[in-house]
Amino acid sequence: MSTLDGRTALVTGAASGIGAAITRRLVADGAKVHAVDRDEAGLRELADALPGVDPVVCDLSDLAAVDRLPAEVDVLVNNAGTQHVAAVHEFDPERFSLILRVMLEAPFRLARRALPHMYARGWGRVVNVSSAHGLRASPFKAAYVSAKHGLEGLSKVIALEGAEHGVTCNCLNPGYVRTPLVEGQIADQARTRGIDPDQVVAQVMLAPAAVKRLVEPDEVAELAALLYGPASASITGASLPVDGGWTAR
């Protein structure tokens, strides 16, 4: 039997990058996956390539729509994210609120809906894709850093409450991963800082890391597989960096 035969998972931000990599790994491990994203074309491509994937188009900033997503899931992966780069005194308050809705309120609502099913079955895994920015801060990312720090706290609360029900909850903390979101950040940072894109990668993104390369999405998926796999029962309330040594400093 595969690790997740008979299990159902839900992954947000599943159409590309880390979410797509985790979805592929979940399917390989036997799960049926509700793949959630606002990118309908990306979801269709993913579902065409992976039997067992149910494409679900949803904008997570619409919390009423979040409350209609499937609730009977055994593995919940909160991965969807967005970014905006600006100094605090210039940061658009509406954009700040939107980022917190997508990256903190939506994960809370999804966990709130999924936990009763997990509790009833005596088993569940919540994997929150946080960031090195859940453990450290950087300038010009007020909303992203705030949302990720909040997600870290939410994860620990779920871990404490879920333990007696056979449910674990952990954070993955990638550094800069080779995804469309990061590609967009390179351009934003170049504009904000007044430097070339290559300088952004070398001088800003990879400066704190010991390993001088972007993380690959499949590397994050492999760590996610550890957190829902056979060795995961006693791993809970943890934050696991995959950041090239960034948070070692």
Image: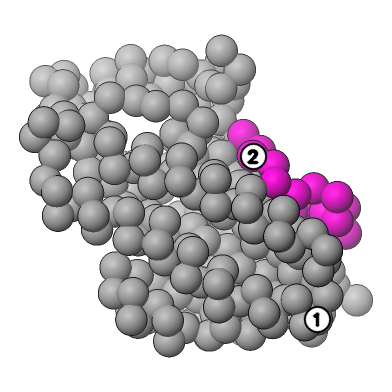
Q: Give the x, y percent position of residue 89.
A: 11, 31
Q: Is residue 154 above or below residue 133?
A: below
**Quarter the C terminus occupies:** top right
> Which span of residues is magenta-colored?
225-241
On the question of residue 29 being in view, the answer is no
Q: Residue at x 61, y 68 (%)?
A: 76
Residue 239 is tagged as 2
Q: Is residue 87 left or right of residue 68?
A: left
Q: Is residue 68 above or below residue 213?
A: below
**Mark 2 Cα-neighbour bin, 10 Å: few <14, some 14–19, many ≥20:** many
Q: Quadrant of residue 25?
A: bottom right
Q: Is residue 58 left or right of residue 167?
A: left
| Residue that label 1 marks | 121
> The residue under label 2 is which amino acid type?
Ser
Closer to the camera in the image, 188 or 50: 188
On the question of residue 82 being in view, the answer is yes
Q: Residue at x 42, y 56 (%)?
A: 104
Q: Quadrant of residue 34?
A: bottom right
| Residue at far right of view | 1
